[in-house]
Amino acid sequence: MYRILIVDDERLIRKGLIAKLAHNNVSCSWIGEAGNGKEALEIIKAESPDIVITDIKMPVMDGIQLIRHCHEKFPDVKFLIMSGYAEFSYAEQALNMGVSAYILKPVDDEKFVKSINKIMKELSYSRNASKNARDVAVLEKDRDRLIRERTLNQLFHSSGIIDRAKLLEKIGLEAGEAGCYYILAIIHVDSSSYYQSPFNYDDLVLIKFSIKNILEEIECNCGKIIVDNQKDINQVLILFYGDDSRKIKTCCNNYIRNIYSKIRKHLHLSLTIGISGVEDKLTSEIYRQARLAYEQRLVLGGNQIFFYDKIANSSLINVPEHKFKLLQRCMEISDFNGIKCILDDIFLTGEGWIWLVFIFALPIPRL
């Protein structure tokens, strides 16, 4: 359905054209009227018509002036002009300005409807072309996002070193823009979120979508890439990059504290965040550091931010991934015997009992 504005200084002509549109079943959702170009310009600003049918000779502002103004400010509006034989030179000017069609007065019904239908077909084609262009842009954006996500996950979860230049090219970054320093943050949605917020576990996709929206909206003074962790459905990864190690560290810390505060405030979620140290190469080491920082929640509880740099020189709880997940599960269901066995296995001595006592001296985190 299209919106049509009729511009003519003679009221009877305007009403006649409206009657012709109705009589010939021309589909339109709105029909407006204006007595001159100046009045029409105000209506165009307010109502955004798709088609303007205008006379050429009018007081105050004629049709040519109206078309010239709209050509600059409203280029998507299509014009059909009405002209007498004596005004053909004006009509020629209008056609040179991109007017879609003109008809001679007195207006013939058949030619009038044919001209309107021609313009509507042009509009339909233009709209479809714009929609297709938008769809292609969305698909390309999704494709680029998936390439980045797959490439970075392969890097983080593999032990090999991937050529930096090739990696940057594959994920759409120029070497000069990417710099040579990196920090990785793991954002984990704690299971306690499902007890403390209106969300259910079934809402995890919605939760992560909301988190990523906040991550995208908040400004960051260094480069950042946001992807899902394909090894853990509860996690989102943020890769920070820049050419100054101190600047990127400051930027990362400020950004993480900002998003941590806003996500808790607006989404009422419990988050545990682990942040790596600064690395000058993109390897799995950066993921290992972020995960070691994040794993401190096993002893210190969740809903906190852990920095690898602050614990790198202390006793890290470096749990093998499969044992780490099993330990998580045992803690979730309060399987004390299971926890003892896993801790004994991890520490290879009876010291697991010491850690067991220490853990239960703290509020058991809901993982």
Image (cartoon, rainbow, N blue to C red):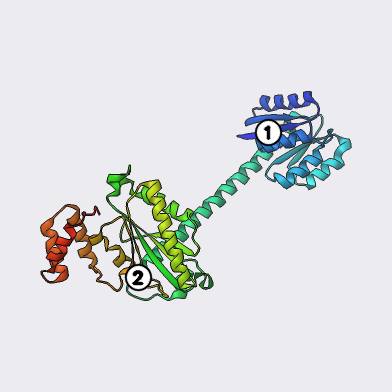
Marks 1/2: CA–CA distance: 66 Å
Q: Amino acid at mark 2?
A: Asp
**Which residue does the image show at 61% across and 42% down from the upper left?**
124
**For mark 1, what is the residue?**
4
Q: Position of residue 229 (x, y in %)?
A: 35, 60
Count every numbered label the image shows and give the total.
2
Camera-nearest residue between 251 and 81: 251
Q: Position of residue 219 (x, y in %)?
A: 50, 57
Residues packed near mark 2 inside 10 Å, few (<14), some (14 to 19) or many (20 plus): some
> On the picture, is 258 further left or further right than 289?
right
Kindly identify which residue carries mark 2. Answer: 309
Q: Residue furthest front?
A: 361
Q: Residue at x 86, y 40 (%)?
A: 88
Q: Nearer the viewer, residue 141 or 310?
A: 310
Q: Taking 347 as reference, is 15 left or right?
A: right
**Is 7 placed above or below 290 here?**
above
Mark 1: secondary structure: strand
